[in-house]
Image (cartoon, grey):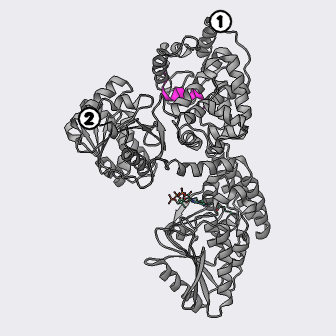
Amino acid sequence: MPDLVEFSKRGAIGVITVNNPPVNALAAGVRDGLLACMRQGQADDAVKAMILIGGGRTMIAGADIKEFGNFDKAGGASLHDVNAAYESSPKPIVAAIHGTALGGGLEICLACHYRVAVPSAQVGLPEVKLGLLPGAGGTQRLPRLVGVETALDLIARGRFVAAPKAKDLGIIDAVVDGDLLDGAVAFAETLVADNAPLKKIRDLDLADDPAAFEAFEKQMAREARGYMAPRHCIECVRAAVELPFDDGLTRERELFTELLTSTQSKAQIHIFFGEREVAKIPDVPKDTGQKPIRSAAVIGAGTMGGGIAMNFANAGIPVKILEVDQAGLDRGLGIVAKNYANTVAKGRLSQAAMDARMGLIQPTLDYAEIADADIVVEAVFEEMDIKKQVFQTLNEVMNREAILATNTSTLDVDEIAAATDRPELVIGTHFFSPANVMRLLEVVRGAKSSKETIATAMALGKKIGKIAVLVGNCDGFVGNRMLAPYMREAEFLLEEGARPEQVDKVFTDLGFAMGPFTMTDMAGVDVGWRIEKRRRLTRSDNLRTSYLVDRVCEAGRYGQKTGAGYYKYEPGNRRPIPDPEVAAMIEAESADRGIERREISDEEILKRCFYAMINEGAKCLEEGMALRAVDIDVIYTAGYGVPRYLGGPMFYADQVGLKSVYADISKYHEELGGYWEPSALLARLAEEGKGFRDL
Ligand code: 3H9
C-alpha cells in the first residue's frame, strides 16, 4: 500500500501526492504526511518548487468528516499548521486540481501560492451543507481572492464552481489541458525560470461591500430559515473585511468550533452519511447483477406520469408515455412542455436542451408500442382494480425481461404483482409530487421482487437524480405510513380545541417546510379522505375516528386546487389564510362528538403529532419495513420537508432521549388508548438506555 502522502521528484519539481481513497480526505495521517513531504522538499536543495496533487480520481475532498465525532482524539497536525507551513514555504507550491477540491481540500490549495486545474475539475467550500463553515482559513482567504459578494455566495451556499469559471473568478491561475501532472510541472518550471513571486492570498487587500452583505443577509433569511451555519459563514466573511488576517482566522476558528459542537451540524452530517448509506442493502450486495435500462415507458400522462417521464428524459433515457385517449396525452405533454419552458425562462435550461429532452418523450395510445421498453412505470389512478388491470395488460404485452414498476403511495405491491406471472420483475417506485422536482424515491420491495430487480431500481433511482430508499411493502410504506398517525393526531387536536394555524405553526417553528394542514391543502384534502375512507373499513370499533375531513370535503374544500381546504386562498396565491368557516366546522364537529374544547399547548401538539410519527417509525424498524433508522431520516428530509438540521424524526428522538419519548408515548397510551401502543423496539431501547443510533 502506498503511503498516505508520497514525495517524488520530476526534475527540479517536488511532487507531493495524497493517496487516501476514495476521496483523499484529510485524515490525521494525511495532515502529518503533508507536512513531512513538504519539509522533505524544503530540505532538498535540488527542489526548486513543489506541486500538491491528489492520487486516484480526485483532489482532496475536505477534512475527514468521520473524525468529527471525536475530533479531539484524532491527533495529527492541525490543518491550520499545515496551511500555514505551505503558505510560508520559501519555494513556490502549486496545487494541481482534478476531480474535486472541496472544503479543507480547497483551503490547502488556497494556502498554496498558485493553483492549476483540468477543465473538468470543480472547487468549492461545501462545509455549510454539513452545518459547518470552512474552518481552515477558507473564509479569510477566499474573499481576498474573489471579493465579498462572490465569497458570500460560494461559502454560505456551499456552491461548487467548475474550473473555467474558477479561472474567471481568480480562484485558479490556469486551466491545463492534457495530463494534469505534466501541465502542473510545466507551470511550476515556468515559475522557477521567471523567478515568480510567492503569491500569498493572506497579503491581498479586501474592500468592504456593505450593500452585498445587506442584500445577501436578506436572501439567506428566506432561503436558509432556521440554519445556523449560513449566518456564521456570513459573520466570518465580515471578519475577513474588518479584522487583520490572523485575527480573522481566530474568529473563524471560534465560530467553527461553535458549529462543530452543535446539534445542527451533527444532524446534517448524519444526513450526509445517511444519503450514502441508504444505497447499501445488506442482502443485495454491490456486485448484484443489474439489468440495463436503455429505454422506459410510463403508463398515465397525469401530473405524476408526466413528472416521472421528465426524470427519464432528463437522464437521457428515451421514454414513451401512454394514455387511453388523445386528449389526455395532449394535456399531459402540454404540462411537461410548460414545466420545461418555465425552467428555460428562469435561465436554468437552454432551449436546445429542452428540445432534446422533449424529443426523448414519445407519446402513444398503443400498448404494443411500449412492449420493448426495459422498464415500465405505471402511474395511473390510485385504485387497486385499475392498477391490477394495467398490470394484466403489461404482463401480456411487455417483453419478458422488462421491469414492471408501480408508482403507488399506499397500495399492496404484492397484490399488484399477483396480476402478473412474473412477480420477481415487479417492484414499487413511489415518486413524490412533483415527481420531476422531489428528490425522494421509495423503492418498494415486493415479497417476490428479485435481487436483480431491486438492484436495478435502486441504481436507476440514482441515475435519474433521486435519493432511492428501499422500503418494505406495508400500508403507506414508510413515509406515508408514519405520516398517517401524525395527521391523525393533528386532526384529533382540532376536535379537542386547537386550530389548523396553531398546529401548523408548531411545526414550521420547529423548521418543517409546512405544517400538516398546509401540506394537506397542497396535496389535496380529497386524496387523504379517499385513503381514510378505505382505512375505516378495517378499523376496529374501539379506535377513535375523526369525521372532520368529511365535513371539509363535503363542502367542496379539496385544498389549494379548489381555493379552499383547511384554509382559504386568494386566487393565484398559495398563502394559507385562516378561515372562520373552518373554525365553525371544527367547533360543530367537537360538539357533535361531545368533546369539550380546551386550551391546547404547543408542547402537546408537538408531542402528540411528532411522537406518534416516531413510534410508527420504530414499528417500521421493528418489522423490517425500514432497513435502518437513518433511512427513515433520509426519507423525511428528502421527501417531507423536514429540515436537514433536525436530522429527521429518529435522530430528533435520539436527541430528546428515548427514555423520555417512550415515557410520553406510554402516558398517551394510558390516556388515549389503542393507537398509542408503544413500539416494542422503542420500549427495549429506552429500557437499555440506548438510542436508534445504536441499532
Ligand atoms: C471540512 O473540510 C472542514 C474544514 O473546513 C475545516 C477542518 C478544520 N470525509 O459521495 P460519494 C466518503 S468539512 C470522509 O459517494 P461521489 C463517502 O461517505 C468537509 N468521508 O462519492 C463515501 O463513503 P462510502 C468538506 C467522505 O463521487 C465515499 O467517500 N467537504 C468524505 O458521489 C464516496 O463518496 C465536503 O463536504 C469526507 N470529506 O462524491 C465534501 N467525502 O463509499 C463531502 C466523501 O463508504 N463529499 N466521503 O459510502 C462530497 O461532497 C462527495 O463525497 C464528493 C464525491 C463530491 C467528494
Percent position (x, y) of residue 163?
A: 51, 68
Q: Is the residue marked by circle 1 packed among few (<14), some (14-19), or many (20+) residues within 10 Å?
A: few
Is 521 in the magenta?
A: yes
Q: Is residue 384 above or below residue 301?
A: above
Q: Is residue 587 above or below residue 42?
A: above
**Image point 60% across, 39% down: which residue?**
642
Picture quadrant of ligand 1: bottom right
Is 190 in the magenta?
A: no
* Amino acid type indicated by mark 1: Gly
Percent position (x, y) of residue 158?
A: 60, 56
* Amino acid type indicated by mark 2: Leu
Given residues 648 and 121, the one toward you in this image is: 648
Return the residue at label 2: 394
Label number found at residue 594: 1
Q: Please identify the quadrant where the N terminus is shown.
A: bottom right
> Which of the two discs, 2 and 1, labels the residue nearer the N terminus?
2
Q: Label 1: state its secondary structure.
A: loop
Percent position (x, y) of residue 551?
A: 53, 12
How many labels were placed on the picture?
Answer: 2
Residue 536 in view in this figure: yes
Q: Please identify the quadrant where the C terminus is shown.
A: top right
Percent position (x, y) of residue 667?
A: 72, 22
Q: Is residue 635 above or below residue 476?
A: below
What span is colored magenta in the figure? 514-525
Query: Residue 497, located in which quarter of the rendered image?
Result: top right
Chief secondary structure of the magenta portion: helix
**Is 557 placed left or right of 77 in the picture?**
left
- Judge depth for marks 2 and 1 and give the one in front: 2
**Is 350 placed left or right of 281 in the picture?**
left
